[in-house]
Image: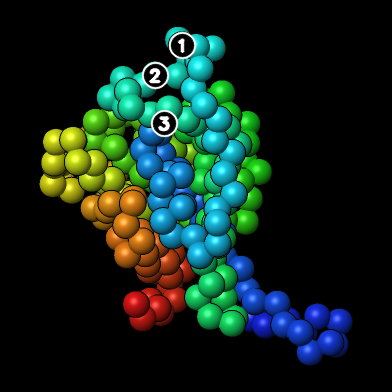
């Protein structure tokens, strides 16, 4: 993950290295909220209002207050320094949009799977997707105010996660909390590649 700078057509202008990270998880887990909290620019969102047409398709049990849904992706950007930028791609949570996932996952450094303990089973498809494709991921347990709190080992057992998959408690609304999740992912990727773990 060494940063590289490119001289654009000998002009002296440089292009920073870009890292792509996916933000995944079930419907209503907080993906759009996390991308919005982390992005330094106004995030691109493809949110649509939930309508009666989604009845029987979108299960909102446990997240009844949710009024919109992502229908393509969310996109945000973080500039680390002149040499490095991080692009965040929030995936849609419903099964009917899974055809987009392979395009979004292409070239990704890794992924964050947001888990909502009110609807924990909803993050199984994301976990299965990344495990099957060998894409490194961490699980961020999003601590909703109205949700029952569980310790991380209880959630790990419920999700049947491998011991080496990092888990982090987080608040998707809080930028600093989100940054700690991303740091956990970058450190996990570095360990898997046998590279030095970057200093936080």
Closer to the camera in the image, 133 or 15: 15
Q: Which residue occupies 46% across, 48% down?
A: 23
In the image, is 28 to the left or to the right of 118?
A: right
Q: Measured along the vertical axis of the image, is residue 73 above or below residue 77?
A: above
> If the image is split into quadrants, where does the C terminus sit?
bottom left
- Crowd rating for badge 3 (residues with CA inside 10 Å; few <14, some 14–19, many 20+): many
Distance between the alpha carbons at the discs numbered 2 and 1:
8 Å
- Crowd rating for badge 2 (residues with CA inside 10 Å; few <14, some 14–19, many 20+): few
Closer to the camera in the image, 10 or 52: 52
Work out whether mark 1 precedes mark 3 in sequence or the reverse, and give the earlier one.
3
Circle number at residue 27? 3
Q: Which residue is mark 1?
A: 55
Distance between the alpha carbons at the discs numbered 1 and 3:
14 Å
Q: Which residue occupies 46% across, 44% down?
A: 32
Q: Position of residue 85 (x, y in %)?
A: 57, 70
Quick one: SS at disc 2?
loop
Quick one: SS at disc 3?
loop
Work out whether mark 2 precedes mark 3 in sequence or the reverse, and give the earlier one.
3
Q: Which residue occupies 63% across, 50% down?
A: 106
Q: Which residue is mark 2?
A: 59
Circle number at residue 40? none
Q: Measured along the vertical axis of the image, is residue 60 above or below residue 84?
A: above
């Amino acid at each position: 993950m060494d940063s590289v700078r490119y001289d654009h057509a000998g002009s002296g202008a440089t292009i920073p290295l870009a890292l792509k990270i996916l933000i995944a998880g079930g419907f209503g887990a907080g993906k759009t909220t996390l991308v919005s909290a982390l992005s330094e620019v106004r995030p691109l969102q493809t949110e649509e209002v939930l309508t009666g047409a989604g009845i029987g398709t979108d299960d909102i049990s446990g997240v009844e207050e949710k009024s919109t849904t992502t229908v393509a992706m969310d996109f945000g950007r973080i500039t680390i320094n002149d040499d490095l930028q991080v692009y965040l791609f929030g995936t849609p949570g419903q099964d009917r949009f899974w055809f987009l996932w392979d395009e979004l996952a292409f070239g990704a450094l890794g992924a964050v799977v947001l888990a909502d303990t009110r609807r924990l089973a909803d993050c199984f498809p994301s976990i299965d997707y990344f495990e099957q494709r060998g894409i490194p991921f961490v699980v961020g347990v999003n601590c909703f105010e109205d949700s029952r709190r569980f310790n991380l080992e209880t959630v790990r057992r419920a999700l049947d996660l491998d011991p080496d998959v990092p888990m982090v408690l987080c608040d998707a609304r809080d930028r600093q909390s989100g940054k700690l999740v991303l740091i956990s992912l970058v450190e996990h990727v570095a360990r898997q590649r046998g590279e030095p773990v970057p200093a936080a």
